[in-house]
Image (cartoon, rainbow, N blue to C red):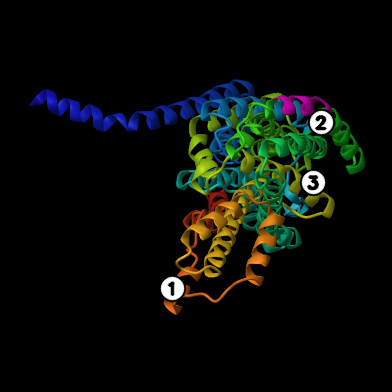
Amino acid sequence: MELKNLNQIENATHFGRPELFRLGTALLFIVAILLFAGMRMGHVPGGFLLVAAAMIGGYMAMNIGANDVANNVGPAVGSKAMTLGGAIIIAAIFEASGALIAGGDVVGTIKKGIIDPALIANADTFIWLMMAALLAGAIWLNIATAVGAPVSTTHSIVGGVLGAGIAAGGLGIANWGKMGQIAASWVISPVLGGLIAAGFLYLIKRTITYRADMAEAAKRMVPILVAVMAWAFGTYLMLKGVKKIWKVDFLTAALIGAALAALVYAVVRPLVARAAGRISNDKQGVNSLFTLPLIFAAALLSFAHGANDVANAVGPLAAINDAILHGGVAKKAAIPLWVMMVGALGIAIGLALYGPKLIRTVGSEITELDQTRAFCIAMAAAITVIVASQLGLPVSSTHIAVGGVFGVGFLREYLKITYAKMIDEIKEHHPAEDHKVVEAFIEEFKRASIAEKGEMLRRLKQKSAATTLTKKERKGLRKVYRHELVKRSHLLKIAAAWVITVPVSGLLAALLYYTIRGMMLP
């Protein structure tokens, strides 16, 4: 009896062990930052504030890794192009590489220029403000990750800076025009991402998967699609990924992307031709051709993300470091190597420990993804940023990627409903007793191309005879059941999280600012 009870206790505690390991590892990382920063800055006047800020920066970096990186690798994992473990390794390597290689030497201290630093009273107020903003953004990201909602880390830190800034300097300190642009991105980012992803998926369906000979169509189209991807990512990396070490204009970036696309097309075309001869003539065979491009896309997105979004973790930390060492409030601050290492390692550790939850949410829980659909989402992620940057529109990479997932899901719903209506139309134009003729016509209809389908329906309507169906039977045939291929509960949860990100992180930051100021004032 006692042995049985011991076994039950053992089984009950087994579930909590992985969570305890993750928490312990995260705490070890924070303690390591404490020891390193303490030895490095303990002798500096006000150095204890920098040590505290470094710990908060590490916490923020882990939350960025846990939440934001899922958008880069989630679709590839959900489509089975990569395993979860492989995705975490690739993302961790390229996120850290992007941060360390292309993260830049300086960072803007006031994210997006949303508050006026001239209205901040002194260096101490600035330090407290930045600490509150950083901690508030990290806490909100932690909450969002816990509930499985992918949110924008940029919006989290923007909300934190805004809330703490207003607490420190009043409503007049905020740049409300910039805040209006950021609010607009809540709609612009997912809509643009969804439309572009859905557009690419429809193009692939029209040119490949709706063809009778899918393998031959793929042999012709896949090299073109991969070349377009090479252009998009080449241009995207020039404009966003390496802009801090080599700033180029759009035309130069586009030309570099075009040269890369031509090279990739020349290399990929014979490889796809050989592979197309071996694949099965179905969607599964076509999907296999997109596996390798998806792996490259996930790696490149991670590199660009590390180069850009590490500033969300280390930007406020670099600003605090500069204010403590030099005094005053600067619009730009140098990023010491140790500060960048905190951000890079924190993102990698957070991804490894807590990233799988959001990777599964983005990759498989919103809608079912295969390699073709995941490829379209990756294309949307790069092209949307390029288009938005040229139009001067504010966009969020998180919102783009998640919008792309919803875009391909809703397109699939629309196509299935449309197809179901076509089948009902075919049945309505045949006598009820002509079952074999109906089935034969439907089989021929399924194999036909889009143009042939339209022509078949047109001819069917022209020669349609009087039907013997009763009114009740006709009504039953017209009923098209809605195929919900996108989980509405996830849509509502994620949209709600996006809308409240800035207000919640702002409110948290204001409360934390007052708490920190109260602790620091004599």
Q: Which residue is mark 3?
A: 386
Given the image, on which type of amino acid does mark 1 rest? Glu
- Dot 3 crowding, Cα within 10 Å, few <14, some 14–19, many 20+: many
Q: Quadrant of residue 329?
A: top right
Tell me what residue is drawn at x 74 percent, y 28 percent: 273
Say which of 36 and 514 sits in front.
36
Magenta stretch containing residue 88, yes or no? no
Judge whether residue 294 can be spotted in this image.
yes
Q: Is residue 420 left or right of residue 109?
A: left
- Dot 2 crowding, Cα within 10 Å, few <14, some 14–19, many 20+: many
Which mark sits nearer the N-terminus, 2 or 1? 2
Judge whether residue 340 can be spotted in this image.
no
Q: Which residue is mark 2?
A: 265
| Range drawn in magenta | 266-274
Specify the label residue 473 is tagged with: 1
Q: Report, in whole angstroms, how far the alpha carbon at label 1 lies from the one at label 3.
A: 52 Å
Q: How many marks?
A: 3
SS under mark 2: helix
Quadrant of the snapshot with the C terminus: top right
Which of discs 1 and 3 lies nearer the camera? The answer is 1
Tell me what residue is drawn at x 61 percent, y 47 percent: 133
Given the image, on which type of amino acid does mark 2 rest? Tyr
Task: Name above or below for residue 211 compared with residue 165.
Answer: above
Which mark sits nearer the N-terminus, 2 or 3? 2
Q: Is residue 202 left or right of residue 500?
A: right
